[in-house]
């Protein structure tokens, strides 16, 4: 109780709305980095968000994609009617449980890593994430009532990615995957120039992720 009171006072002083601070949520964090080594900055951001969320009383469940044992989909029949492996079914249960889904990954060749894309293809199947519409109607979104945030790291400056590349791969994840299933609103953080970032810059991002975790944003 004292911890929550301290967080409330500190974050109110920083200008966060009180209603965001007081509402606890069920949060699933998806660490989408294919490299499980501890030195990856995505893992540090992941931990910072977890620490902030737990400190404010949110319920946390974690998915580390690099630790899951699943095959890549190779046919449309498997996507439409195949039976997901047990690790994938467990992840689907976590998505059902969640109020808020946080996805972290590095930008590889202008998009999410192939392993993370394969994960979404396995988890967000017809009948779970969406249902075919009748006739020519739009598919029914089955994961409504959930929000999400995306945190993506990259070597290039974040402003350049937004301006020159129009953040096209992140917009595709937002529009063609998450919103397609009914997940919204979706918030985004782009962490650019990771390789050139010094200790002060990394510390600033870690503190920011802790604040976002406290608010479940």
Image (tube, rainbow, N blue to C red):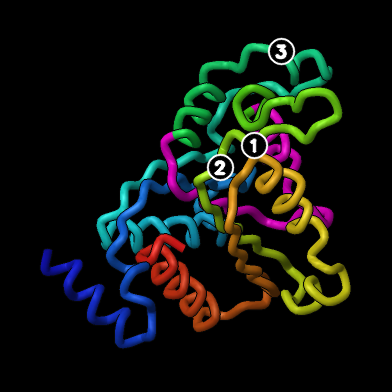
Q: Say which of 195 and 207 sits in front.
A: 207
Q: Name the secondary structure under disc 2.
A: loop
From the image, which quarter does the N terminus lie in?
Answer: bottom left
Q: In the rendered image, which residue does mark 1 sit on?
A: 141
Q: Say which of 139 and 208 sits in front.
A: 139
Q: Are marks 3 and 2 in contact (CB under 8 Å)?
A: no
Q: Are marks 2 and 1 in contact (CB under 8 Å)?
A: yes
Tell me if residue 70 comes above or below residue 208 in the rendering.
Answer: above
Q: In the rendered image, which residue does mark 3 sit on?
A: 81
Q: Position of residue 169 (x, y in %)?
A: 79, 56
Tell me if residue 11 comes above or below residue 100 in the rendering.
Answer: below
What's the residue at 75%, 79% (across, down)?
159
Q: Position of residue 214 (x, y in %)?
A: 35, 65
Q: Say which of 214 and 133 sits in front.
A: 133
Q: Which mark is residue 144?
A: 2
Magenta residues, as a range? 97-122
What's the residue at 32%, 68% (across, down)?
21
């Amino acid at each position: 109780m004292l911890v929550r009171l301290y967080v409330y006072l500190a974050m109110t002083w920083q200008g966060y709305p009180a209603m965001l601070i007081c509402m606890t949520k069920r949060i699933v964090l998806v660490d989408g980095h294919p490299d499980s080594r501890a030195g990856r900055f995505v893992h540090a951001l992941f931990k910072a968000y977890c620490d902030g969320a737990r400190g404010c009383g949110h319920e946390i469940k974690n998915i580390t994609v690099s630790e899951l044992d699943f095959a890549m989909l190779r046919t449309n029949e498997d996507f439409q009617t195949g039976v997901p492996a047990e690790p994938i079914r467990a992840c689907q249960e976590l998505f059902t449980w969640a109020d808020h889904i946080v996805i972290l990954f590095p930008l590889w060749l202008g998009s999410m890593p192939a392993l993370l894309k394969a994960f979404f293809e396995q988890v967000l199947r017809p009948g779970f994430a969406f249902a075919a519409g009748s006739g020519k109607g739009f598919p029914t979104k089955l994961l409504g009532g959930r929000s999400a945030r995306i945190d993506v790291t990259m070597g290039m400056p974040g402003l350049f990615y937004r301006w020159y590349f129009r953040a096209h791969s992140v917009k595709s994840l937002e529009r063609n995957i998450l919103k397609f299933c009914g997940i919204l609103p979706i918030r985004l953080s782009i962490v650019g120039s990771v390789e050139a970032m010094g200790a002060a810059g990394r510390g600033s991002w870690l503190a920011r992720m802790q604040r976002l975790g406290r608010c479940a944003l």
